[in-house]
Image (cartoon, rainbow, N blue to C red):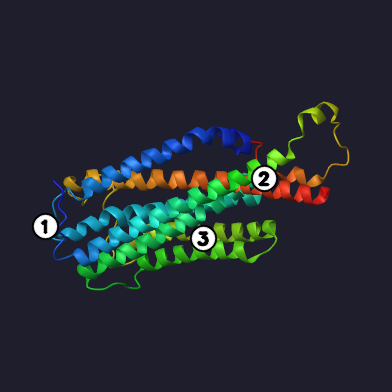
Amino acid sequence: MLDLDMTPYAAFVWPAWGVSALVLAALIVRAVIASRKWKRELERLEAEDAPPPQATLDAAPRADGPQVVRSTIGPKE
Amino acid sequence: MFGLSNPQRFMAFTGPLTPVLWAVAAVLLAVGTWLSFSVPADYQQGDTVRIMFVHVPAAVWGLGAYSALGVSSFFALVFRHALADAAARAAALPGAAFTALALFTGSLWGQPMWGTWWVWDARLTSVLVLFLFYLGYMALRASIDDEQKGARAAAVLGLVGLINLPIVKFSVDWWNTLHQPASFLTPGSSGLDPVYLPPFLTMLAAYGVLFAALWLTAIRTEIRRRRVLTLRARKALEA
C-alpha cells in the first residue's frame, strides 16, 4: 500500500519529489519540442531542395557547387 | 561501435532505439515512484528516506552525464569529430539539471537530518563546482558567435572539468565531511536496509535510461539542426 503521509517531514519530502518531477518534465518537453522543430524544418528544406521529377533526368552535377555542403554532418532524411 | 560515429549510421541506429528508451524510462519512473512510497519509513530518518530515491540517482547521473560530456569533448578536440561535439553539447543541459536536482534535494534532506541546508564540506562543494562547470560549458558555447570556436573552447573547459569527477567521488574518503561516505554500491558493506534496495535501484535505472533517452534525442536534434544550417547556408550562396 502507498504511504503518502509524510508527517512531520512533508515540507521536505514533497518539494524534493515535486521539483524533481517538474524539472524532469521540463527536460522531456523541451527535448521533444526541439526535436520536432528541427525535424520539421529539415523536412521542409529538403523538400524545397529536391529537384522536380522532370528536372532530375536532365540534372548534371555542378562542378562549382558550394563547398559549404562538405561540412554537413546530418543525414539526408 | 565506431561505426556509429558516422552520423547517418547513428541516425539509423538510434531512430528505433530512442522511442524504446523513452518507454522504458516512463515505466521505470512509474514503478520506481510507486515503490518509493510503498516502503516503510526509516526508523531513524523517518519519511525523509524517500528523498534518497530522487537525490542519489540525480547525483549519480549528474556525474555520469559529465563523464559523457568530458569524453565526447576529448574526441571532439583530438579527432575534430562533429558527432562527438554534438554529443558533448547534448549532455550538458540534462547533466546540469540532474546536478541542480541533486543539490536541491540534498539540501532538503540535509535540513531535517543535519540541521542545516548547506555546509561547505568537500562533497557538497565539489558537486557545486560540477554544476558550475556545466554552467560554464553552456555559457562559453553560447557566448562565442563562431560555433566552431565556441565548441573548441567549451571542449577544453569540458576536459578540464573531468578533474573534478574523482574529487566528487572520493571527497567523502579524502576529507572529513558531513556528507556520509558511499554506502550503496560498495561491495559487502551496503549500509542500506534491503527493503530500500528495490525502489533505490529502480529509480537509479529510471534516471539512467531517462538520461540516455534525453541525450540521444538531443544528439539527433543537434545533427538535424546542423544539417538545416548547412542547407540554409547553401541556399544563401545559391541565391
**In the image, what residue occupies the spot 13% across and 51% down?**
B40
**In the image, what residue occupies the spot 17% across and 59% down?**
B47
* Residue furthest left in the image: B43
Locate the C terminus of chain A by quadrant: top right
Q: Residues within 10 Å of mark 2 (few under 14, many from 20)?
A: many
Same chain shared by disc 3 and disc 2: yes
Write down the chain letter for disc 2: B
Residue of label 2:
B227
Regarding residue B177, the answer to whether it shows in the image is no
Left or right of B88 on screen, residue B46: left
Image position of A48 with respect to A28: above or below: above
Q: Position of residue B231 (x, y in %)?
A: 72, 46
* Residue furthest right in the image: A63
Q: The disc labelled 1 sits on which kind of residue?
A: Tyr
Q: Position of residue A18 (x, y in %)?
A: 30, 59
Same chain shared by disc 1 and disc 2: yes
User: In front: mark 1 or mark 2?
Assistant: 2
Image position of B122 with respect to B80: above or below: below
Work out how far the residue at label 1 is from the one at label 2, CA to CA, in angstroms: 56 Å
Write down the chain letter for disc 1: B
Write down the chain letter for disc 3: B
Which residue is nearer to you in this view: B137 or B35?
B35
Q: The disc labelled 3 sits on which kind of residue?
A: Gly
Residue of label 3:
B161
The kind of secondary structure element at disc 2 is: helix
Number of numbered discs overlaid on the protein picture: 3
Same chain shared by disc 1 and disc 3: yes
Residue of label 1:
B43
